[in-house]
């Protein structure tokens, strides 16, 4: 009786094995896809960060120039 039960269980496992392998392969593909998406997002963030840093640098330079010009005009008006 136990032998018959074990043989049935073994047959069930044999039948389920291909589906399990397919599931594992599918999960691996999904995992790889997610990793690729994360890598692309990180790359996009790095690119955006560099662009923002560049914009901030030029904005800061322009602000400094405006302040210097304003101070120069104020000095000129005081000496006039």
Image (spheres, grey):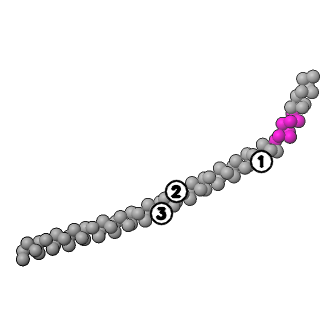
Q: Earlier in the sequence, mark 2 or mark 1?
A: 1
**Residue visible at 86% across and 36% down in the picture:** 12
In magenta, the rendered stretch is 10-17
Q: Dot 3 lies on which element?
A: helix
Which of the 4 image quadrants contains residue 8?
A: top right
- The residues tagged by marks 3 and 2 sit, at their Cα atoms, a distance apart of 9 Å
> Which disc is residue 42 wearing?
2
Q: Are marks 3 and 1 in contact (CB under 8 Å)?
A: no
Q: Which mark is residue 47?
A: 3
Badge 2 element: helix
Residue that appears at 61% across and 56% down: 36
**Among the 4 quarters of the image, the one containing residue 13:** top right
| Up-down relation of residue 24 to residue 56 (above or below) | above
Q: Could you tell me how far apart the alpha carbons at marks 3 and 1 are, in whole angstroms? A: 37 Å
Q: Position of residue 56 (x, y in %)?
A: 35, 64
The image shows residue 64 at horizontal and vertical percentages of 25, 67
Residue 43 percent across, percent down from the top left? 52, 60
Q: Quadrant of the C terminus?
A: bottom left
Question: Callout 2 environment at 10 Å: few (<14), some (14 to 19), or many (20+)?
Answer: few
Magenta stretch: includes residue 60: no
**Quarter holding residue 11:** top right
Mark sitting earlier along the chain (3/1): 1
Relative depth, front residue between 16 and 67: 67
Residue under numbered circle 1: 22
For the residues labelled 2 and 1, the Cα–Cα distance comes to 30 Å
* Principal secondary structure, stretch drawn in magenta: helix
Q: Earlier in the sequence, mark 3 or mark 2?
A: 2
Tag 1's secondary structure? helix
Is 5 left or right of 47, judged from the image as shown?
A: right
């Amino acid at each position: 009786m136990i032998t018959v039960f074990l043989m049935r269980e073994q047959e069930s496992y044999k039948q389920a094995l291909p589906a399990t392998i397919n599931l594992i392969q599918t999960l691996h593909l999904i995992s790889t896809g997610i990793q690729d998406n994360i890598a692309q997002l990180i790359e996009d963030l790095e690119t955006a960060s560099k662009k923002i840093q560049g914009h901030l640098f030029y904005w800061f330079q322009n602000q400094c120039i405006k302040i210097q010009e304003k101070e120069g005009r104020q000095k000129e008006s005081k000496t006039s």
